[in-house]
Image (cartoon, grey):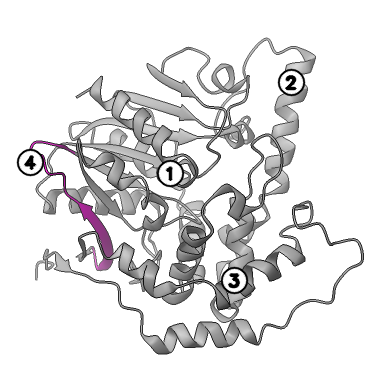
Amino acid sequence: MSENTALTPFRIDIPQADVDDLRNRLARTRRPAPVPGRDDRADFSRGIPPVYLEELAEYWRDGFDWRAQEARLNEYEQFTTVVDGQTFHVVHARSADPGATPLILNHGWPGSFVEYQRLVPLLTDEFHVVIPSLPGFGFSTPLSGTGWELARTVEAYAEIMTRLGYERFAAHGTDIGSGTTGRLAAVHPERVIGTHIGCDPRWLGLLGDKFPYPEGLSEDEAAQIEAVRAEAAAERGYLAMQEHRPDTIGAALTDSPVGQLAWIAEKFKSRSGAYRTPDETVDRDQLLTNISLYWFTRSGASSAQFYYESAHSGIDLVMASEVPSGWAVFDTHPLMRRAMDPWKAIGHWSEFTEGGHFPAMEVPELLADDIRAFFRGVS
């Protein structure tokens, strides 16, 4: 029997009982005993500062309005569709211009389609915007089974674009989304017009693993890169846990909203000039909307499975492609291009002093302008 290829209209409507349960759980939070000297709300050296976490949790409980945020998300057309047995949630923001270019926006972890909430209206003048949720993320839950890694997901995304009637399309991604974006171009070069990647200096931490070290570094330059690599390594604890023990961390994330809050909010801190807390980096309500999505859909556990599957798939996540590619580097580092594109093979290379790891949330206007500029040059 062939699979049902229907696009089923979807509207977010979290049961009030779930909203009430979240508030009740937050009110009953069992907090760790305070450690003297850990009272700096911006000191993330040991993880998310307890004093800051408590402040954010109190706002989530008493100040955050889920229904208002839910209504904003429902302003966009959404649907679900089943591909290879898995339900996928998709946002489809059509342009008023019928001839606009289809553009798939690929999110990563701990992002979601919410990550692109502020970017979408800046793009629909030129693009039909499509945002699928990764399997196990948001409303692309529950998982239909094991085996949902990056390569299988890319094939599902290509099928979703086919079902929408988009034979050719553009692609943008950050974080894991850069992997889905790049693989789409590598395995479907006849369909992908171009790829636009958003990245930051954390990518220097991939040197020696996914990318070779640049040649001819001075001692000072080598020390700069090693400092970035060391900082990136210190933040990879979550990665090891999700790649190897997703069931263990998943149990905690599903049962404790403050645990889920800490696990995600820490990743939104910024080092743009000086340390800033997550809600000084991105909008507090947008941040909590994203975290609420993980909580209500139990995606803390299922999204961790995506890391496990991809890490154990044996598939090379970095693939070469002849499709035109553009990179936008946010919170740039002086050695980024020399390290990541020493041959100047990437035709469109932009660098910005701000924007961080989540540019669609931090600097959506800069990102939108760069996406438009790149695709105008390749369409």
Q: Magenta stretch?
A: 84-101
Circle 3 or circle 4, nearest the eye: 3
CA gap, disc 2 and disc 4: 50 Å
Q: Is residue 286 visible?
A: yes
Q: Seen from this angle, which residue lies furthest right?
A: 36
Please state if 81 lies on the left or on the right of 293 as rendered: left
Pointer 2 residue: 222
Is residue 89 rendered magenta in the image? yes
**Kind of residue indicated by mark 1:** Ala
**Kind of residue indicated by mark 4:** Pro
Pointer 1 residue: 360
CA gap, disc 1 and disc 4: 25 Å
CA gap, disc 3 and disc 4: 42 Å
Q: Earlier in the sequence, mark 3 or mark 2?
A: 3
The answer to which of 262 and 233 lies nearer the viewer is: 262
Circles 2 and 4 in contact, beta carbons < 8 Å: no
Circle 1 or circle 3, nearest the eye: 3
CA gap, disc 3 and disc 2: 43 Å
CA gap, disc 1 and disc 3: 23 Å
Circles 3 and 4 in contact, beta carbons < 8 Å: no
**Kind of residue indicated by mark 2:** Ala
**Kind of residue indicated by mark 3:** Tyr
Please state if 252 lies on the left or on the right of 170 as rendered: right
